[in-house]
Image: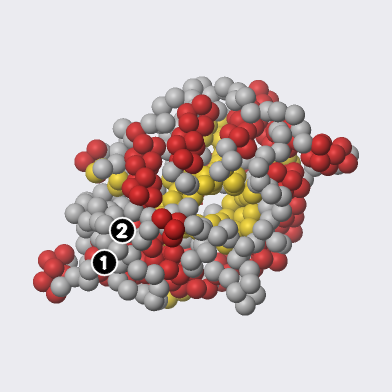
Amino acid sequence: MQSFPVRARAASCVMAMAALASAQPTPLKLLAQAHGIDIGVAVTFPAASGRAAYDSVVTRNFTGIVAENDHKWGSISSNPGVYTWTNSDRMVDFAQQHNLKLRFHAFVWHQQSSYIANGHQSGVAQPTDPNKYTRAEAFTHMRNHIGAVMQRYKTRNGGQMHVISEWDVVNEAAARDSGMFDTANVYKGLRLSTGNAVHLDSGLSRWTGYTQGETNDFDYIDSAFAIAHRNDTAARLAYNDYDAEGMGKKSNDVYSLMAKLKSRNIPVHVLGMQSHWYIGPSNTGSSGAWDPQQIAENMNRLAALGLDISITELDIRMQNPVDSAKLQQQRQAYETALGLCLAQPRCKSFYVWGVRDGQSWINSRYPGYGSPLLFSGTGTTYTPKPAYYGLISVLETTASVRRQPGAARQAPSLNYRATGPVRDLLGRRVHAAPDRPLFKAQKPAERSQAK
Ligand code: 9MR
């Protein structure tokens, strides 16, 4: 694993904190706060019997949380206008109660999205007709869903508190560049929608089909951001994707999309780099490959567009069985990832995708691979791994950078308005609230054609 030259001498306050805490591991959280970086974790709510230990690892070590599944469209709403808020509310309450930031994940996605876009999850009926919704209907659902969630969570305490630090407005719209996808399912680097063959990793997106994305320049993407912005003009809005961290076809496609959105003044503020990586034998290729120099380069060009960068779903898997050499390699990889973020002033949050190895999605998704996270253990035991200590040591020995310490609740003020009107990808003016349609409602003739 290539090391990345980001280490420098420690800021004295950080060193002092480390010395004070030498008897036991310094909570990651204190060090993160001293750097002004949000180090968060994806959470689920395990069975009540295991809750206390889980909660304490989360609240002791992390400054933020993101719901691994509980905020996805399909987790909240099974039918238009029908909402089950129980688990979703618990996440928000938990964040508020423990003074944690909360990344909201996610609105517009082609998976885990129940009636609107999800054809592959077991227990969810396969839509028999990929054009089940018309363009206008799809946008209406989008507008209603984003509105329902944002109005519920955008502020707490009578409007005084922003609990959600970032919203993943669009997730994984770009097509992957590996051979896994049929290139016929890709257009302009984005996912298409054809037939009924929507399943995990097929590369297809019903959002493209419903909104006739190819002919409308994928304007479901910019519309989602504009709708989210209308619901909360102070919200930080993110586009989130995977395998687009380094320099390559997919990251170029994501960059082009971002540049286009920015040039139209669409309110997108954050690029989420999911960062599902692996250690050895090589950092090249696709599907979890990563290269530190390339990532730094990509971060720089995205920052130059005016975007903040968040590491949103970091995990670094290894081939089973685990051994100490691999754990050291993994530690170095985690250190490198955090170093990259600390070295880039616009990289402000660093989230790992789960608390403990046994709870990770990697175990079922990549048979033969595992141990991707910062803690191991079973039952109520959460044992910090070398990677955990690696993050601590990076925070202790990296010169403190540009950020103000403390977990400010108020979203930063946004200045994109100064640069002119917001336009969608087709160049149409996007109006601020009160609500007006972003897109042309379809005439009855178009509607029957699309059905
Ligand atoms: O970790 C999530 C897992 O529990 C779900 O079964 C899976 C369904 O696709 O989604 C996982 O989280 C994904 C995230 O929402 C988006 N980026 C990729 C993540 C890993 O698949």
Question: Which quadrant is home to the C terminus?
Answer: bottom left
Looking at the image, residue 299 sits to the left or right of residue 135; the answer is: right
Residue on which the image places disc 2: 424
Which residue type does callout 2 highlight? Asp
One can see residue 10 in this view: yes
Secondary structure category for the residue under label 2: loop
Residue 163's tag is none
Above/below status of 236 relative to 82: above
Q: Name the residue: 37% across, 45% down.
A: 259
Q: Residue 299: percent from the left, percent from the top? A: 49, 37
Looking at the image, residue 263 sits to the left or right of residue 4; the answer is: left
Q: Name the residue: 26% across, 61% down.
A: 428
Q: In the image shown, does 107 or 443 lie closer to the viewer? A: 443
Residue 252 falls in image quadrant: top left
Give yes or no for contact between labels 2 and 1 (Cβ–Cβ under 8 Å): yes
Q: How has the structure been colored for display?
A: secondary structure
> How would you rate the neighbour count of disc 1 (Cα within 10 Å): few for under 14, some for 14-19, many for 20 or more?
some
Residue on which the image places disc 1: 439
**Mark-to-mark CA distance, 2 and 1:** 9 Å
First in residue order: circle 2 vs circle 1: 2
Which residue type does callout 1 highlight? Phe
Q: Residue 103: percent from the left, percent from the top? A: 56, 56
